[in-house]
Image (cartoon, rainbow, N blue to C red):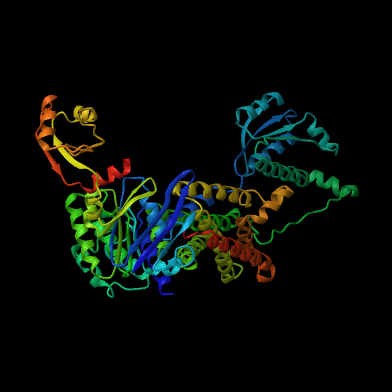
Amino acid sequence: MRTLFFLLQKEFIQIFRNRTMLPIIFLMPIVQLVILVYAATLEMKDIRFSVVDLDQTEQSRGVWQRFEASPFFHLNSFHSSEKRAMQDFYEGTADLLVIIPAGFEQSFYRNEPLSVQVLVNAINGLTAGLSSSYATQILLSVNQDLPLRLYAAQSSSQLKQIEITRRFWFNSSLNFKHYMVPGILVILVTVIGMFLSAINIVREKELGTMEQINVSPIGKVQFILGKLIPFIIIALFELALGLGIGKLLFDIPFRGSLWLLFSFAFLYLLLVIGFGLLLSTHSRTQQQVMFMSFFFLLVFILMSGIFTPVETMPDWARKVNYLNPFAYFMKVNRMILLKGSSIVDLWRDFLTIGLYAFLVLSLAVLTYRKRA
Amino acid sequence: MTAISIQNLHKSFASNRAVNEVSLNINRGELFGLIGPDGAGKTSLMRLIASLLLPDSGSVHVFGFDTRRDYRSIRKQLGYMPGRFSLYPDLTVEENLHFWATVFGTTIDRHYHLIEQIYKPLEPFKKRKAGQLSGGMKQKLALSCALIHSPSLLLLDEPTTGVDAVSRMEFWDMLQGLKGKDMTLLVSTPYMDEADLCDRIALMQQGKILSAGNPHHLRTQFIGRLWEVKTPQIHPLKQRLNALFGCEVAHLFGQCLHWTCQADMSIDKVEQVLKQFHIPIDSLREIEPGIEDCFIQIARS
């Protein structure tokens, strides 16, 4: 116990004496949260659109003026033909085309089915989906709002509509930041935990102090614990700092128990840091270990569902995600903070990560050799 | 009493035989020198004794404990100072010493008398980071850290390599001072002139031990008479020695040439031959063989 205490003391002295790493440890959460949350937003504004109005009537103008009035859209230019308008697509000056056919007004007053063509640049499927759903909403409102249409609808019972009222649960204002903050916190905590621990043992190897420790009576478990505990403490501190910033800047809700969140974070960190230590004991240079952990981190982050929902991934990818520690914490973090989920809803994730951590840590201890 | 006993030890890295059929006994309380050029296998042998490497075949016993099975018992009594400076450069002198003391479950105070002489000159710098010390001071600190738990066996891997001549002598003085304290010291070095400072030595080359024993005794085993000549034409003479004297062993030693002949020749005869072939002589004398001469003779035979 006494030896472990001094191992920890030594680690902390070294961490706090490192003039390049220390600022990063404390600046990273602030920079990541502030910049990434604002930058990586999926709320779309100012989608540039061009109009081809072949009808040139009051009713047709009403349609594109609604687009223009919407905060989501920004009028780029008018064109006399679809072909000309397509040029805007190619040049990248517009991402959406609204084409109103000739005879639009005529059909309108005759109470015939109306058609408006909307073309969307779908290079990025996600933004295309959002743009087109915004456009659909605007076109539906054209249908509903015009008094004449309404009058017609009331007089002929065949046109009765189903009115849809929506209420968004857990994030009622569809505040994208509330969704992003927990995700970015996961990345933050993982990067700190995994990188720092992975570099640490390799550094001892490069210094040659590893051999000195190896010839000493320090046990494997003591040694691994001495490396594990400092980084768990730092990473949990980062999580607390990140949550504080999230609360202050973005007013993210803490609906669930913070104790539960920190318990899960603890298990998760055992796993992630164990993983870092495992990589570390099998590398000889800092370069090797950085490259390896970077590779794993990148795959884990992209698969985790921070940018694209896990639900849209193909079946095999979702199965691969069972091995991805990121995906669990990403999910649990959002569930606890935004939904207020309790242990009853999350015990499976707790169990999985707990077992996973046990496995990886055992592997790290067992494969760490005190001699060759 | 035996401190280290090595039997038929083999260790290879890929196709390189680092330690090849080594058998050796080192007595308790002895200052033993492991002497040989770079790549002779000294470090590998040290690491095998330190139980950091496992032997391919053969065995090493330290105080009767097998390095393969009982390495835990060995490590409690072992101090190991690797060839490279291997302390934490970002910890201070004092913190390093404190850390290594606690790692071995002891305190600085308990064994301070052991390191007092070595650590004294470092005391004024105890708040300085180890990475910022000079070479000689780093070494004193490393030795202090290796000694702080009062090991029964101290392994020093090339402690004097890359150290200036004054610090080297100082270091050997420190080692001599430790000898009386019931401690077995095993020192490896590529410098042959350090051999005479050891109680016993082993000459090592290409993974094998060429010869082992008391350095004075080793020198008496030198075969033939050894001549030393100083001349401006050192290289041409070296090439012609064989034709002139039927010489067997010739090597450069500083600015002099050392050689031995089987044939028994007087100093006048040698001088006569050299003059006959117009080789200018600054000095010529018969000398007692040093360890380096012995090493070269054994290595060539």
* Percent x, y of residue A77: 62, 30
**Which corner quadrant of the image does residue B129 belong to?**
bottom left
The image position of residue A176, as x and y in percent, is 60, 53
Q: Is A366 in front, or is A73?
A: A366
Q: Is residue B224 above or below residue A88?
A: below
Rendered residue at 82%/33% (across/down):
A106
Determine the image quadrant of residue B255.
top left
Residue B90 lies left or right of residue A238; in this view the side is left
Against A49, residue A189 (above or below) is below
- Label count reads 0
Q: Nearer the viewer, residue A162 or A206?
A: A206
Instruction: Judge whether residue B67 can be spotted in this image.
Output: yes
Q: Quadrant of the N terminus of chain A?
A: bottom left
Question: On the rendered structure, is B75 left or right of B214?
Answer: right
Question: Where does the image place residue B267, in percent across and percent down from the top left?
Answer: 11, 37
Asked whether residue A22 appears in the rendered view, the answer is: no
Residue A159 vertical placement versus B227 (above, below): below
Q: Residue at x 62, y 33 (%)?
A: A94
Q: Position of residue A273 (x, y in %)?
A: 52, 60
A214 with respect to A56 (left or right):
left
Given residues B71 and B260, the one toward you in this image is: B260
